[in-house]
Image: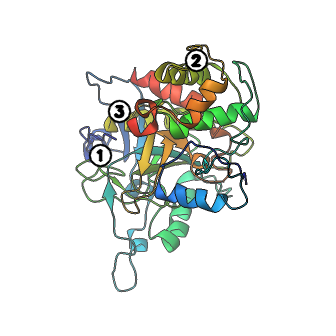
Amino acid sequence: MRTFVHRSALVRSTAVLAVGAALLIGAPTANASAAEANCNYIDDAARPTVNPGSTGNAVSQVQCLINFYSAYPNWLEEDGSYGARTLAGVYWVQTCNETVGGADGIVGPSTWSRLYAPKDACAISAL
Amino acid sequence: MTSRPVSPLPRRAFLTALGAGAASIALAGTASAAPTASYTLLSRADWGADETLRFGTGGTELWPSEYYPVQTLTVHHTDDGSSDPDPAAVVRAIYRTDAAEYGDMGYNYLIDKAGLVYEGRWSGTDGTPAHDASGRMVTGAHVQGYNSGNIGIALLGTFTTTPPPSAARTALVQLLADLAARHTLAPLGKVVYVNPVSGVSRPAPIIGGHRHWAATDCPGTLYTAMPSIRDEVAALLA
């Protein structure tokens, strides 16, 4: 179980907050907020650049975050393979959130940030 | 989440037309969806369901039916281990086992290796498999905690390392397309599923496998096949 926390997922639900509170024990305190609890392929603090064609857990994390937090209307298989379906999802996230660099399919710091904390209009609650 | 009952097809009309107990369900051609696929459905009477198994010794219904709008369609393999060559006998055996635990068949539909579709859990007397007359689905027992509003479809067999027979897969796609059309579900889509009984919610694929909901091998290779299955469903509805 990951122990890092970050500022996303602030108010997903009371249940998530309860889990996040438990995770706070022994966690870094510089950023006191609830942990993201649904996607655990990589650590929330690990945000490697992910490109079309990439494979591995960081890709699964991107797919999972889109599934759980974005209003992107299609389901993405969390298979760790960055193909055309994932690219469509990343384009959607980048366009909706107006990430730095525009819709280029490259998951860098700005896109990672919005995968964890989408703008309200791009969040799954808007689905 | 939208759910629109799309004129449930009266099974009896097809039975009468065919006269042999097998109902060929042609997907209704409408302005929004005009698929040409069809599948053959066997009712509980057709496959020989012993309806007394749903009742206790005092005549009490073991698990009274509950009906909710359809949100998701979930695929399973039965992994029942049977080697009986008669698929209807396998369905009856699964029914007996499930009835002892869940009061009735856990799945809403089953599909055999030849692509025949079997009505699963009992859903009233209106003649519409898996649904009541208003188009709501009967709650089954196939994904723990996520049964209400979630239709369970099981392919007979164990497909952990092998693909299902092509006839079974074809019928699955046709059944999924029928249900997606009737309930206005997007085949590639996701939904924030809300259990109408417990209130528990989570994102889920509209068309998925058991493994999308829980840590399980079920439905075997059908799990990784799900993107292509969704595409085929979408193509039927296009």
Amino acid under label 2?
Val
Q: CA distance from mark 1 to mark 2?
A: 56 Å
* Image coords of residue B149 (percent x, y): 39, 52
**Residue A56: mark in rendering:** none
Image quadrant in which the C terminus of chain A is located: top left
Task: Check the image and report above or below for A106 versus B151.
Answer: above
* Image coords of residue A53 (percent x, y): 73, 19
Marks 3, 2: nearer the viewer = 2
**Could you tell me which chain the residue with mark 1 belongs to?**
B
Q: Which residue is mark 2?
A: A100
- Residue closest to the eye, B67 or B195: B195
Image quadrant in which the N terminus of chain A is located: bottom right
Residue B225 visible, this angle: no
Amino acid under label 3?
Ala
* Image coords of residue A48 (percent x, y): 74, 29
Q: Are marks 1 and 2 in contact (CB under 8 Å)?
A: no
Task: Check the image and report above or below for B140 versus B27.
Answer: below
Q: Are marks 3 and 2 in contact (CB under 8 Å)?
A: no
**Residue B181: mark in rendering:** 3
- Residue closest to the eye, A126 or A21: A21
Q: Which residue is mark 1?
A: B11
Say few, some or many: other residues with alpha carbon within 10 Å of mark 1 (under 14 / 14 to 19 / 20 or more).
many
